[in-house]
Image: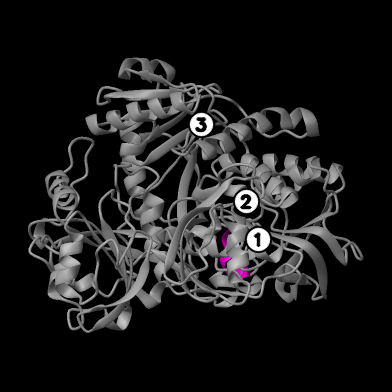
């Protein structure tokens, strides 16, 4: 596994992986395990030289989503056997981990953690404070409410682990080329849509060249956002400073000491050569903003480098760490690490096929969880490449959960500061991210805010979660018990069940399919029969080749060879990409075009047993069963506006959806009863 030699860069490969981070090496390793050895891994510096080499190396198995837990459990199994397989040490040790609670609320959260662990078949034990102290003798326990013990957790040496994965891949025939920087790409439109035809590279000696590839995998770590722009995909991640210290030997620290997490103090600890590695996630991080404009602001070269010490930002972590482990107060600090790590816009990493490009996959943005996740994530990505789709649910980390605007480089640093701190913030039910808001607003946003709406977000949209009696009360008071908004939401439910309610659902994604083959294309994609008659709708599942469920859609035939698809707010990018990828695989590409028209229409849902009465007061159209049967869709007048009304409901009561062109979605054009009714934006007849 030497660095590149002259003539060693191939002109073509079945798979080209960009980035010698731990995930890139894991993808290469698992592709080889699946029989794919015509693979080249391209690293601009040397393996591990970016973020991997200074990662802390903690491996905690449990995540809220079962699929993510399965990924990490596989990682622990892989790391346990990798040393014997490759002959290289990995530093893997299953030492277990403790998470402690300073408060009663945190202890409730840890009990919930234990329940999730049981559901996911992860070994977990609740402990009282004294029992936690027995497992971690140098810890102060008098202020603790308890702890959880996860015996299957562990730690590893990130650089050694990466090199072992690389050796496993190399031994199977994967080529690894160091000192070669990808600087661009050429694209072509082929039988399966737009794709990357070749990667353009430059080496450290100034030589240039290209390498063709059937599949490209972007695992560029914190360089992925800038590389993504060159390749043609938006990658919403941003680097923040992340700190830890390593101490000299401390009496009482043994090699078997478990990993310790004290989330109320924002800190973690692991044993390191008889001393402690202590780091954490302060509530507000420091984004790494560089003046250099090239390659996303990261200076070149940036290999095995750290940032200047930032003791001011680290102070809150050190103070809390000393509370938990008093011996730190007198311990000698051997090293201070300030390394940039990339964080995504929602604290979940990025994995999967890139939208709009038939042969590009992305894996990056691990939010300080890359070592724990890389084994399983590499396997999942390799399986998706070989088989054409993931083998299990990866939606929480699917890159298509983001839209291109979420890679905005002024917005991302603001979001990154908050996301970094979420690691150890209390994971309250219904918690909403607060930074970088408001972002996307419906035309009725101002009216709803004045009416007492408390907003949440989905795909950047501001959406009313509930309406408070006054604007001053429109906030979520987080807690584990009964929420402050329960009585107000109960009134809204009652209105919808007994009278009528109006919901602003403008955030729902809307896709227009138009062309001579539009009906045939949709008929192929979904399980139900797609209507041919204008003014009819269908609600159906969109399936994949295995018969698995990709999405559920409402499809309206609005004219001959023209259909409106309505899907979930978070699914616009993914559903469009799934449709386009699927149609591109057909022997004859259908003659139709797909356009995202989400921002062209506001959508109001008028629902409840008296919805017909309300609509009859504000429109001259007829809404009786004969004139407007279930699943029908018609153009109607509504105040000064002409809108599409579709009789369909998701609340179990009579109801209509009103699709309003945005230029008409205001008080000026819509009847007042639909935009600011007597119940704080909720119209009740």
Above/below status of 561 relative to 336: below
The residue at the point 13 percent across, 74 percent down is 672
Task: Identify the residue under disc 2.
Answer: 544
- The C terminus, quarter of image: bottom left
Provide residue 106's location: percent of width, then percent of height: 28, 33
Sequence order check, earlier mark of 2 and 3: 3
Secondary-structure class at tag 3:
strand
The residue at the point 55 percent across, 71 percent down is 296
* Label 1 with label 2: CB-CB less than 8 Å: yes
Which circle marks residue 582 in the picture? 1
Provide residue 397's location: percent of width, then percent of height: 52, 50
Q: Please name whichever residue, 366 or 456, is drawn nearer the observer in this view of the structure.
A: 456
Residue 279 relative to residue 549: left or right? left
Sequence order check, earlier mark of 1 and 3: 3
* Alpha-carbon span between mark 2 and mark 3: 52 Å
Task: Identify the residue under disc 3.
Answer: 275
Residue 233 relative to residue 151: left or right? right
Magenta stretch: give its range. 220-228
Provide residue 183's location: percent of width, then percent of height: 70, 73
């Amino acid at each position: 596994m030497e660095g590149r030699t002259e003539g060693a860069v191939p002109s073509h490969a079945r798979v080209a992986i960009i980035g010698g981070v731990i995930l890139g090496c894991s993808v290469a390793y698992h592709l080889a395990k699946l029989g794919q050895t015509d693979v080249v891994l391209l690293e601009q510096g040397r393996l591990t030289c970016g973020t991997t080499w200074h990662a802390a190396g903690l491996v905690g198995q449990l995540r809220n989503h079962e699929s993510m837990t399965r990924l990490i459990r596989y990682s622990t199994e892989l790391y346990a056997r990798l040393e014997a397989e490759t002959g290289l040490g990995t530093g893997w040790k299953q030492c277990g981990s403790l998470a402690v609670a300073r408060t009663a609320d945190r202890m409730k959260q840890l009990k919930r953690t234990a329940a999730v662990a049981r559901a996911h078949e992860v070994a977990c034990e609740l402990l009282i404070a004294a029992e936690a102290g027995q497992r971690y003798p140098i810890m102060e326990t008098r202020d603790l409410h308890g702890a959880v013990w996860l015996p299957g957790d562990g730690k590893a040496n990130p650089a050694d682990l990466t090199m072992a994965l690389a050796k496993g891949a190399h031994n199977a025939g994967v080529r690894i080329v160091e000192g070669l920087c990808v600087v661009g790409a050429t694209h072509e439109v082929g039988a399966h849509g737009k794709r990357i035809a070749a990667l353009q590279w430059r080496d450290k000696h100034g030589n240039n060249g290209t390498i063709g590839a059937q599949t490209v995998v972007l695992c560029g770590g914190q360089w992925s956002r800038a590389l993504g722009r060159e390749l043609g995909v938006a990658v919403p991640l941003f680097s923040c400073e992340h700190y830890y210290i390593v101490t000299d030997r401390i009496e009482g620290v043994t090699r078997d000491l478990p990993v310790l997490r004290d989330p109320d103090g924002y800190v973690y600890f692991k044993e390191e050569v008889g001393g402690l590695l202590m780091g954490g996630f302060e509530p507000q991080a420091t984004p790494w903003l560089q003046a250099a404009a090239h390659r996303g602001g990261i200076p070149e070269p940036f290999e095995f480098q750290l940032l200047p010490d930032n003791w001011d930002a680290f102070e809150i972590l050190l103070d809390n760490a000393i509370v938990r482990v008093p011996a730190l107060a007198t311990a000698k600090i051997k090293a201070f690490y300030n390394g940039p790590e990339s964080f995504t816009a929602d604290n979940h990493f990025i994995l999967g096929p890139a939208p709009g490009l038939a042969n590009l996959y992305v894996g990056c943005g691990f939010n300080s969880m890359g070592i724990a996740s890389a084994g399983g994530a590499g396997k999942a990505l390799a399986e998706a490449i070989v088989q054409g789709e993931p083998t299990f649910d990866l939606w929480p980390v699917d890159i298509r959960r983001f839209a291109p605007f979420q890679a905005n480089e002024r917005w991302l640093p603001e979001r990154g500061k908050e996301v970094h701190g979420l690691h150890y913030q209390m994971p309250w039910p219904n918690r909403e991210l607060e930074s970088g808001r408001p972002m996307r607003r419906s035309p009725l946003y101002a009216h709803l805010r004045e009416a007492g709406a408390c907003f949440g977000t989905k795909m950047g949209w501001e959406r009313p979660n509930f309406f408070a009696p006054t604007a001053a009360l429109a906030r979520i008071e987080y807690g584990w018990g009964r929420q402050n908004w329960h009585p107000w939401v109960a009134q809204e439910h009652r209105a919808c069940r007994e009278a009528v309610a109006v919901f602003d659902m403008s955030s729902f994604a809307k896709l227009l399919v138009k062309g001579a083959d539009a009906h045939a294309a949709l008929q192929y994609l979904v399980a139900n029969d797609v209507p041919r008659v204008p003014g009819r709708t269908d609600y159906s599942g969109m399936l994949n080749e295995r018969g698995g469920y990709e999405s559920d859609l409402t499809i309206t035939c609005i004219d001959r060879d023209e259909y409106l698809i309505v899907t979930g707010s978070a699914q616009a990018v993914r559903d469009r990409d799934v449709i386009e990828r699927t149609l591109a695989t057909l022997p004859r590409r259908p003659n139709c075009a797909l356009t995202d028209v989400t921002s062209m229409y506001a959508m109001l849902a008028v629902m409840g047993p008296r919805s017909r009465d309300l609509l009859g007061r504000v429109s001259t159209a007829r809404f009786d069963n004969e004139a407007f049967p279930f699943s029908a869709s018609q153009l109607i007048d509504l105040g000064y506006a002409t809108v599409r009304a579709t009789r369909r409901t998701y609340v179990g009561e009579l109801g209509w959806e009103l699709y309003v062109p945005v230029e008409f979605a205001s008080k000026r054009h819509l009847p007042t009863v639909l935009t600011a009714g007597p119940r704080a934006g909720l119209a009740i007849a």
